[in-house]
Amino acid sequence: MTSIGDAIRAVAPGVSVQANAPLAPLTTFKVGGPADWLVEPTSGDDLVRVVQCVLRHGLPLTMLGGGSNVLIADAGIRGVVVRPRGGTLQLVGRDIVRADAAVTINGLVRWTVGRGLAGLEAWAGTPGTVGGAIYGNAHWRQANIGDVVESVRVLTRDGGVRQIPADRLDFDYDTSRLQQSGEILVWAAFRVRPGQDPDALRAVARASLAFRKQTQPLAAPSAGCIFQNPQPRRDAVPEGIPPSAGALIDRAGLKDHVIGGARVSPVHANFIVNDGTATAADIAALVELCRATVADRFGVRLRDEIVRLGDWQATG
């Protein structure tokens, strides 16, 4: 019987295909077990061919981008993990930049800033890729990445390809249509403003990156913010406490709390960091302790911003 690895190599020659591939080094948390199969297409066309092949074989399919904002189970991920790499950027007309899903947000920022195209410079320092940012409608301060999206091209779970305008992507806080539909981003088109001074845009990018360095524990492995911030229309935060997951965890007395090799960051309480020895189970236990303690103390149930991937039942 032809293995899925052989089948993928047949439809996408030259694409990297690995069996029993370690995933921890590919995530910003640096934890998690292996993938049964890891496939790394380097173009949008190869991404489509690979996903269509996996779907035809009926195997579980997991998409992995830059490895931020995810927590992979210690038991790893069954089936096929597809991790797009590289990708292209192009200017379409005067004011639309099209970026493949695998392009990093920082790469997108550098590309637009260097060409005097404004609109994305404040996203400097954002971890991960375009695909992950669109999937989770990445936010920075009061802005969402969906605010500057014009349209996207996606691969549907039945193997079809379609283009979708931004107003049909159901963007909301930390959410998009892709989370419900299972559609996979191939590329995204962003609105930009041409004719700007690259040096002025670089100054904005540097200021954004500097603020992140001052307020976030960027030196230690983490996945970014663990929880979504409470939403006024859904959550009743006690008076005197900012509507912030980090503030609630801090007021609950959990800043710097440790389970195994996982620690609530003393810099920002909505970050959990790995001291180099943490397991995914350590991190998950600390996540649940924070959730339960905040619910008990303040009556607010925090919702995950990170996405858990893999075989958590086998982990226990």
Image (cartoon, rainbow, N blue to C red):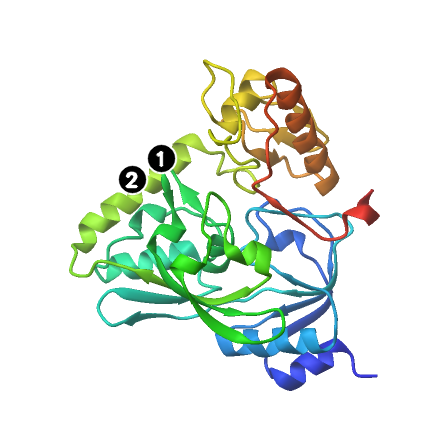
Labelled pair 1, 2 in contact (Cβ < 8 Å) = yes
Residue displayed at 48% across by 32% down: 231
Residue displayed at 48% across by 38% down: 218
Whole-percent x and y of residue 312? Answer: 77, 47
Q: Nearer the viewer, residue 36 or 166?
A: 166
Q: Nearer the viewer, residue 86 or 45?
A: 45
Furthest toward the bottom, the residue is 10
Crowd class of label 1 (few under 14; some 14 to 19; many from 20; radius 10 Å): few
Whole-percent x and y of residue 179? Answer: 57, 54
Which residue is labeled 1 in the image? 211
Q: Quadrant of the image for the N terminus?
A: bottom right
Residue displayed at 63% across by 29% down: 263
Whole-percent x and y of residue 162? Answer: 48, 73
Mark 1: which amino acid?
Answer: Phe
**For numbered disc 1, what is the local secondary structure?**
helix
Which residue is labeled 2 in the image? 207
